[in-house]
Image: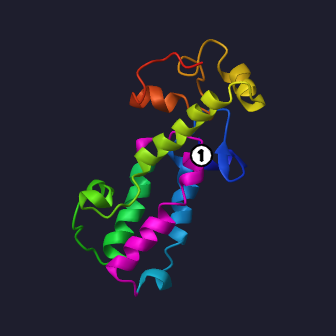
Amino acid sequence: MSWETCFKYLGISISDRHLNIEAFSPIMLKMSKRLDPWKGKNLTSGGRQILTYSCLSSIPLYCMGFYGLQDGVHKKMDGVRSKFLWQGVEEKFRYHMAKFEMVCRPKDQGSLGIINTKIMNDCLLVKWIWKIHLEPNSLWFKILKAMYMKSGGFFGSSMKGSSLSFGKAFTKSNTFSDGGLY
């Protein structure tokens, strides 16, 4: 399924089928557009670090708050950010001074503190579980429960094929071991 066949609502791809990596390609396109050659040509490595942290890492946050993105999407986002951090907008190859996973560690551990998109994605999805815990009688949760959790709780639901599958991300990554939340 290509991203052209998805329905866009508030900038997020929505479909009645599973969204593949191509459905999230507009995010990478938007990240690449932010890196026009005139913006990054004369930046120092510190300037590229700040732009990577403040701009490139914040573009996918809204989408990550709704979907558990596949590892391939995270790798593509990290590829755009890593390439810009180490070589800027030039096409000339430069060696990477460290693995991007190491660059994404916190500053107090001696790293640059750039956001790890996989961890941030999990954290943004946990936010929904916290909202469900605080407001179990809210209208939005009653609608979600009626539509997607007919056969069980939050983790045991059968949301096959749905693009609104924020509960599935936690069962795959084993973020939570107990499956009895609502």
Q: Is residue 132 left or right of residue 79?
A: right
Color theme of the render:
rainbow
The kind of residue tagged 1 is Ser
**Which of the two residues, 28 or 182, is positioned nearer the viewer here?**
182
Residue positioned most to the front: 134
Q: Residue 79: where, in percent of width, then height?
A: 38, 59
Q: Secondary structure at mark 1?
A: loop
Quarter of the C terminus within the rendering: top right
- Magenta residue check for 179: no
Q: Quadrant of residue 115?
A: bottom left
Q: Residue 18: where, in percent of width, then height?
A: 58, 34
Q: Residue 127: where, in percent of width, then height?
A: 56, 39
Q: Check disc 1 and report the residue beneath it.
A: 2
Q: Is residue 161 left or right of residue 91?
A: right
Quarter of the N terminus within the rendering: top right
Segment tinted magenta in the rendering: 42-71
